Amino acid sequence: MKRILGIDPGLLHTGWAVIETAGSERRYIASGVILPRATDPLPERLAHIFNEISKICADFKPDECAIEYTFVNKNPTSTLLLGHARAAAMVAVGTHNIPVFEYEPNKIKKAVTGVGHADKNQVAAMVKILLPAAFATPAKAGTKTSDESDALAIALAHSNTSGLLRFACNNKSV
């Protein structure tokens, strides 16, 4: 059984999710959203993300972490700021000696839905099918934010991708 932490980084909303995987089985453990105050200075928001991810690592003891790779969008300043949030999360994970694996958004979508350009609703629908327990917890009343759903998708993508890579390597077909 392997425990995977999925992280969907953001300066205002950092989604996180922990799943366990063994073979083709996936089990929901926990998820949430880290919400730094938008009015706080950048260093405080980054410290908040770092501290919360560090607590999640200490509490859930993941074996591996999967995080979304930052893509360059139309606004370079937004991309740079997102990179800061991503770095804060990665450093927090790294201080716990947990390996970090990075995935491009289209690869995450393809690993979860089979389509690299799936929209957020399609991804959320597949996450709900693959991890129904994530949506059945009484505290969440069957709902997840898009940040949590994305973090679950990132963890699932890593589970699906890393399992295929291990299978291919064990069967020497790589």
Image (cartoon, rainbow, N blue to C red):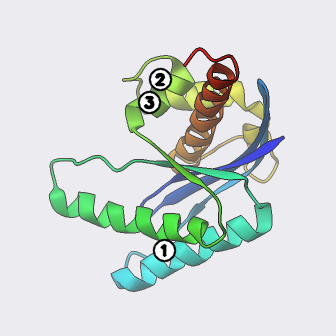
Image depth: mark 2 or mark 1 in front = 2
Write down the residue under mark 1.
36
Check contact, mark 3 vs mark 2: CB within 8 A. yes
Percent across and percent down for residue 25 are 80, 27
Q: Which residue type does callout 1 highlight? A: Pro
Q: Is residue 151 above or below residue 127?
A: below
Which is more N-terminal, label 3 or label 1? 1
The earlier-in-sequence mark between 2 and 1 is 1
Label pair 1/3, CB-CB below 8 angstroms: no
72 w.r.t. 56: above or below: above
Q: Amino acid at mark 3?
A: Lys
* Quadrant placement of the N terminus: top right
Q: Left of 120 or right of it: where is 5?
A: right
Considering the numbered disc 3 on the image, is that residue within a helix, a strand or a loop?
helix
Q: Dot 1 lies on which element?
A: loop
Q: Position of residue 162 (x, y in %)?
A: 62, 33
Q: Dot 2 corresponds to which residue?
A: 110
Q: Position of residue 3 (x, y in %)?
A: 76, 48
Can residue 40 be spotted in the picture? no
The dot on residue 107 is 3
Q: Residues within 10 Å of mark 3 (few under 14, many from 20)?
A: some
Kindly identify the residue that appears in the image at 47 percent across and 61 percent down. Answer: 13
Going 60% across and 73% down the picture, which residue do you hit? 95
Instruction: Tell me whether the residue at label 2 lies in contact with that at label 1, contact meaning CB atoms closer than 8 angstroms.
Output: no
Q: Give the total of numbered labels.
A: 3
